[in-house]
Structures are given as structure tokens and as C-alpha cells.
Amino acid sequence: MLVFLLVGIIVSSVVTCIQSDIKRLVAYSSVVHITSVSVGLLLSLFLGYKRALIIMFIHGISSPILFFVVGELYELMGTRSLVFIRGLYLLFPTLF
């Protein structure tokens, strides 16, 4: 099971890196976070439980914020495509 989850993390990470839709990018990164929580719990060590708890806490904070930012970018730009919003860095350098 551990090998299956680790392969899933690698495959999901690669799929995340090739996304052109920013909302899908956030969603696939969320899958990677939750899969790494499963790996931490499967290790059954104190460090694994601690790691899983920290990842769940950080994911609970960062994921809604990322989806909010994506929604606001969609309202501002009218698209979720990374190809069309890549020039956004010039407008809002502090956002990145």
C-alpha cells in the first residue's frame, strides 16, 4: 500500500506540473497533500502521525485561500488559463 501511495504522489505531482488551468493545478496539489497524509499515517510512527497532523493543518488553511485567490483571479481576468494570466506577475509582483 505504501508503494502504491508513493507512486500516486509522484504521478499526481507530475500531473499537477503540466496543468494549464490554475483551478485544476490547485485541486491536484490538494490530492498530493492528502495522499502524503495517508503515507504519514501508514508509517505508524510518531513522526508519521506528527507529519500527517501538520500537513492536514496547513492544507486546511492554504487550500481554501488558494481556491479563493483563483476565484478572484478568474473574476479579474475572466480566464483560469495560466497561458493568459502569466503576465499577471508584472501587474501584481507581491502576489507571487
Image (tube, grey):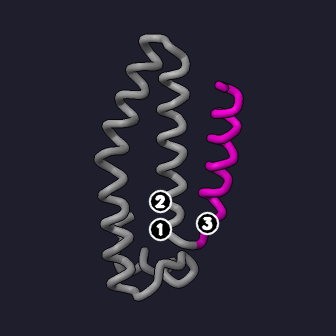
Residue 19: x %, y % from top left: 61, 66
Residue furthest out toward the front: 1
Note whether 83 is above or below 13 in the view shown: below
Q: Residue at x 42, y 25 (%)?
A: 51
Who comes first in sequence, dot 2 or dot 3? Answer: 3
Amino acid of disc 3: Gln
Q: Position of residue 67 (x, y in %)?
A: 36, 63
Q: Are marks 1 and 2 in contact (CB under 8 Å)?
A: yes
Between 44 and 89, the one lying in front of the other is: 44
Farthest bottom residue in view? 78
Magenta stretch: give its range.
Answer: 1-20
Image quadrant in which you'd find residue 4: top right
Establish if 12 lies above or below 72: above
Q: Residue under circle 3? A: 19
Residues under labels 2 and 3: Cα distance? Answer: 9 Å
**Rendering quarter of residue 94:** bottom left
Asked if the stretch drawn in magenta spans residue 18, the answer is yes
**Residues at badges 2 and 3 in contact (C-beta under 8 Å)?**
no
Residue matched to label 2: 26
